[in-house]
Image: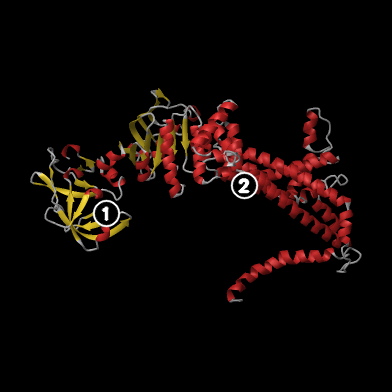
Amino acid sequence: MLSSKHFFLLPALLTLVAIILFPLLFTVRVSFSSWDVFQSGLDFIGGSNYVRVFADDRFWQSLQRLSLLSIISVSLQYTLGFALALAVWKQVRGGRLLRVLFLIPMMTTPVVMSVIWRTVFHESLGPVNDILSAFGVGPVPWLSSATGAFISVLIVEVWQWTPFMFLLLLAGLVSLPKEPYLAAAIDGAGTWRTFWQVTFPLMAPITIGALIIRLIEASKIMDTVYVLTSGGPGTATETSSYYIYIRGLRDFQIGYSAALSLVYLVIMIISLTIIAKLLLRTLVGKDE
Amino acid sequence: MAKIVLENLGHSYLSNPKGEHDFALKPVNLTWEDGKTYALLGPSGCGKTTMLNIISGLVPPSHGRLLFDDQDVTSVPTSARNIAQVFQFPVIYSTKTVRQNLAFPLECRGMTPSKIKQRVAEVATLLDLDYALDMPARKLSADQKQLISLGRGLVREDVSAILLDEPLTVIDPQMKFMLRRKLREINRQTGMTMILVTHDQSEAMSFADEIVVMKDGLVQQSGTPEELFSQPQNDFVGYFIGSPPMNMITLEPNLGSLSTEAINLTKPLPAAMPVGNNVSIYQMGIRPEHIVMVDKESDSIGKGTIIKIEHLGVDGVVTLKLPTGVIIKAKTRKHTEMTLGDTFGIRVCKKNALLYIDGTLSSSLN
């Protein structure tokens, strides 16, 4: 029965409908239309947008690139973040100051930061090549070669998001129980064994959470690519979201980009669910 | 195996302790014989865990020395100290199987695989964990995990003593009983010294050959369970050991003896009577178990009216109000035949009524 108390749910429900449900359903509808710059409006062309998606090599390449980029960058962020967290975990001199300093990259606006990095990597004016030339290393084509641009995007991603990993992992480390460490000391385990047998397994749940959150975020990468390389040179750093942006908001193929978005969404949901399950199985051992 | 000697051993967590109250463990001298079982008993925050952590080397003591077999180990690190410790919460290496867990301390010490295999098999048999050796350790129940923690200590041949820091707290009541029996069994079979920290007196009484009762960082009494029960050295031990606690009845000095209106039982007055403001408090301590309730009031030392009856199965605890308003408790098996408001005579064997002066047992006058 509907009673007065249910009306209190209305503001939340309306917000949900407005910001999630309506856009989602509308995108689904749009994806079955040929809405573009010549023909605006909702007609119905069946699944032909989807047929086009499956034949679009550029989209699948961007997805591959995105997978590679997010897996490498998140792995590096995790390793570096864990190392930094371990470094300031134990009482060290100036630890509090270091913690704040480590967090600065995360606080910066991605676009602003990317502009700064673009300057840093600038092949003739940027400081990186200037410093490298002092060591006799010739000018590196940071943004004009395919590999260089990919590495540049990677460096910026790692630089910006390692602090986030650091923050999550440090919070995890601080909350670990003391007894396992005492037991390991009594069992005679050294630093290395203690890390692999005690710290790492105890951190597994936090590791999984941190990795999944970062993978979701990393697969949405857009602003860094937009400012730093604009997907180039060629399509060397073009990620899925950037390609969808090009199709939708630069070429105004609204119907087609809606189909791309939905395919991308489904692939992400499936692959991240599988990754989460795999991580859970290998790290926590929830196998039954 | 080793004899453990605490020589004036004390600890303060403050760098510059100003007085006795700054000590988590006040300096104490104790000797623990090889192969016996000991219990450190006391309320939370009394310094038992500090004492245990000093022995295992996790906390370096601020005062005194610790000797294992007459060797000074005060500054020897934990890993070199040949101590095993079981904690309140079972500690297992969750990614390893039971077998790998048991083998871990030996691997850390660089033993040969064949020797490790043999030791693990021996300990698994001792702990009845043979069947679970290849199971992931995290899948076991809490009591089995606690056995693994214990096993990691037993597997080492160099262990001087096993320290148990409230290891039964998280275990189910029935399993608790079995695990306690298992610990006793292992102690008999291996002859390993075991030191149990607990705040549960029945656990301490049933486990240990000797109990150390502590309060506020100070050792109150150390002795066998029988001694602690029959001759508690002070009112705290009388209160803490035994359930319900000892009855303490205040006595007044009167014509060369100590007596009370509540019951007709006197104690001789100590020779040196305190004078002036230093008036001592005299108390008679009687265990509820030593109070006999009789129908006839003629040969009893007093009478009381029942105000409460607690049923504990075979035994019952009866609360009696004496005519002077003093409340005492008695343990009896006839509680089912009694009703509230009944009046009974009280009989106590004189040797079971102990005299306490200012809370301390006066041995000469009992």
Task: Say yes or no: labels 2 and 1 on the same chain.
Answer: no
Q: Residue at x 84, y 50 (%)?
A: A60
Give the letter of the chain under mark 2: A
- Residue pictured at 31% horizontal, 57% vertical: B311
User: Residue B154: x percent and y percent?
Assistant: 48, 33
| For residue B171, side relative to residue A189 (left or right) | left
Q: Residue at image x 19%, y 39%?
A: B362
Residue A134 picture location, percent across and down: 78, 29
3D distance between C-alphas at marks 2 and 1: 55 Å
Which chain is disc 1 placed on?
B
Which sits in the foreground, B313 or B364?
B313
Q: Decide which of A82, B360 is in the foreground and name it.
A: B360
Q: Which residue is mark 1?
A: B333
Mark 1 element type: loop
Foreground: B270 or A79? B270
Q: Decide: is B50 above or below B80.
A: below
Nearest to viewer (mark 2 / mark 1): 1
**Relative to A154, A53 lies left or right:** right
What is the quadrant of residue B168 in the picture? top left
Quadrant for the N terminus of chain A in the image: bottom right
Tell me if B112 is positioned left or right of B243 in this view: right
Q: Is residue B339 above or below residue B164?
A: below
Image location (x, y in percent) of residue B87: 47, 40
Q: How is the image coloured?
A: secondary structure
Residue, far right: A38
The answer to whether B161 appears left or right of A123 in the picture is: left
List the residue tagged with mark 2.
Answer: A205
* Picture residue at 30% right of the left edge, 58% below the top: B310
Q: In the current view of this chain or complex, which residue is farthest to the top?
A: B71
* Three-letter code, disc 1: Arg
The answer to whether any part of residue A251 appears in the image is no
